[in-house]
Structure formats: structure tokens, C-alpha cells
Image (cartoon, helix red, strand yellow):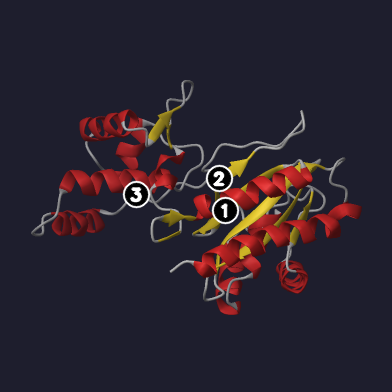
Amino acid sequence: MSRVKTPSTAERSAADADASSPGSVPALDRSLDILELLSTSPTGYTLSELSDQLGFPMNAVFRITQTLLARGYLSRDAGSKAFQLTPQLLRLAPPRWGSVSLPAISHEAMTALRDETRETVQLGVLNGLEGVIIDQVEGLEALRIAVDLGLRFPLYNNAPGKLLLAHMPDARRDAVIDQIDLVRCTPRTITRKAALLRECEQILSDGYSTDYAEADEGIHCIAAPIFDATDAVVGTIWISGPAKRMPKTRFRELGIQVKAAGDRVSSLIGEMK
């Protein structure tokens, strides 16, 4: 896991100068720096690592992290003592239309899709060079897929990630593929740029994307886009389940169902004023 580069003295001096400008709040700046740094690492950072990476005094980092812990924005691993972001931040800033958020407007369609397929239904959005899960409705089977909200996923080895990648403008998609490391996770993981681009074209043609155990052995998923009124993709909805219940022979059948759910959410968004 790569670490964020520690700012140079010159960079830190410039940041300090900005922080001392009229109207700035240094403690708030530091709090946001901590949150932004933690967003880059799924495994989190310890108190000393946060202090070292950001160049902040240990006691300042301690006070800020204790406040964020108390407010529910951070959790702390009992073993490693590393701080991690919680889903609390996701509740503040999902895509929304007026007072209605993407999870709220999607919930009915997600529940209906879960009832139709009996598999876990999840909702995600693009966040930088990754996707992030912002809601889920757990499946009805005894053996089912369930994750913590806030889980991040790559844009190349799973259905929702490939879906979000495919719907980017061509130039943006090429730039993103050049920046991500196409690590092989299973024998079916796409690890070549040309193959990933072909997969994106297939996704745009089909209207949905599939994951044939490309991220994890024995896990399949199928995703569809959610559009806003301008036909921009604002999120993705997908089902995840064991390969035994979701074999490749069912991908088209399930893909049509997932796409219909995404279309229902898109239609509701289009009606929002």
C-alpha cells in the first residue's frame, strides 16, 4: 500500500501561510487534512503515522482524532491502533437532488431487485480513481454477500468499477486506465489496457457490466448505471452473489433485471425538480 508523500518544508510553509490568511481556521484545516489522508488508505494510519505524514504535532493530531472518534467519523482498529474513516462521511455528501439523496431515491428499486433476485443489492459512486459503496440491501439467502458501507473498489476487476470506468468520457477513461495498476487478483482479472478498453465497449453496448470472479474467486456481480437528467452517470447499482447461484449462463437474464432497476432510479431522478 503506497503512502502519501510527506510535504516538503517549502510546501508546508506555503500551507501554513495559507492557513494564516484572514478567515482561515487552522484546527479545521488540520482536521480536513487528516480526513483526506485517511481517505487514501483502506487500512488507515496510526497516530504517529498521521503526525509524521502531515507534519503536525502529536498532541494536535491526538485532540483532533479523539473528537472525530467521538463524533463517529473515525474508527480505530483495536490491534493496529490505526484510524479509519467510517461511513458517517458518506451520509453527508452522497449525490442529492433537493432534499433527496441517491440512497434514498434508490432504496425502493434496490429492495425490489433484492426481492426479485434474492441476492444482495449494492449502490456505489465514483470517488477519484476508485468507487465507493454508499448503500446496500442484504440478500435473502443464508449465504449472502455483505460489506461495510464506505468500502472502496477498483475500477477494473469488478462489475461496478468497470461500469463507472466505461461511462467516462474517452479521454478521461484513457487517463484513468494509465493511472491504475491492473493487478491480477484471479486468473480472470483483466490486466491489459487493450482488453479493458474492449470490455468497456462491451459494457456500453450491453447496458450492464459483469464480474466473472475477476476480483474474488467464487463471487460474481452484475452492475448497471444510474443516470441523472442530463444522462450523466451519477452512480451504479449491482447485485453480488456466489458463483453457484449466479453462473455465467444467467448473466444476461440478471443483467436485464439489474438494468431495469437502474432505469427505474434514473427515471425518478429525471422527475426531480
Check the picture and name the quadrant holding the C terminus.
Answer: bottom left
Amino acid type, label 1: Ser
Amino acid type, label 2: Asp
Whether tag 1 and tag 2 are in contact, CB under 8 A, the answer is: yes
Label 2 residue SS: strand
- The label nearer to you, 3 versus 2, is 2
* Residue density around tag 3, few if under 14, some if 14–19, many if 20 or more, within 10 Å: few
x 81%, y 40%: residue: 218
Give the vertical position of 200 relative to 101 (above or below).
Answer: below
* Position of residue 229 measured from the top left corner of the image (x, y, whole percent): 52, 73
* Position of residue 121 measured from the top left corner of the image (x, y, whole percent): 67, 46
**Residue corresponding to mark 2:** 135
Q: Residue furthest top?
A: 78
Whichever of callouts 1 and 2 sits on the residue coming sooner in the sequence is: 1
Whichever of callouts 3 and 2 sits on the residue coming sooner in the sequence is: 3
* Position of residue 42 measured from the top left corner of the image (x, y, whole percent): 51, 41
**Residue corresponding to mark 3:** 6
Label 1 residue SS: helix
Foreground pick, 71 / 23: 71
Give the vertical position of 158 relative to 145 (above or below).
Answer: below
* Residue density around tag 1, few if under 14, some if 14–19, many if 20 or more, within 10 Å: many
Whichever of callouts 3 and 1 sits on the residue coming sooner in the sequence is: 3
> Could you say which quadrant of the image residue 237 lies in?
bottom right
x 19%, y 43%: residue: 27
Amino acid type, label 3: Thr
Give the vertical position of 35 relative to 250 (above or below).
Answer: above
Task: Find residue 106 and name its label.
Answer: 1
Residue 95 appears in view: yes
x 60%, y 60%: residue: 265
Label 3 residue SS: loop
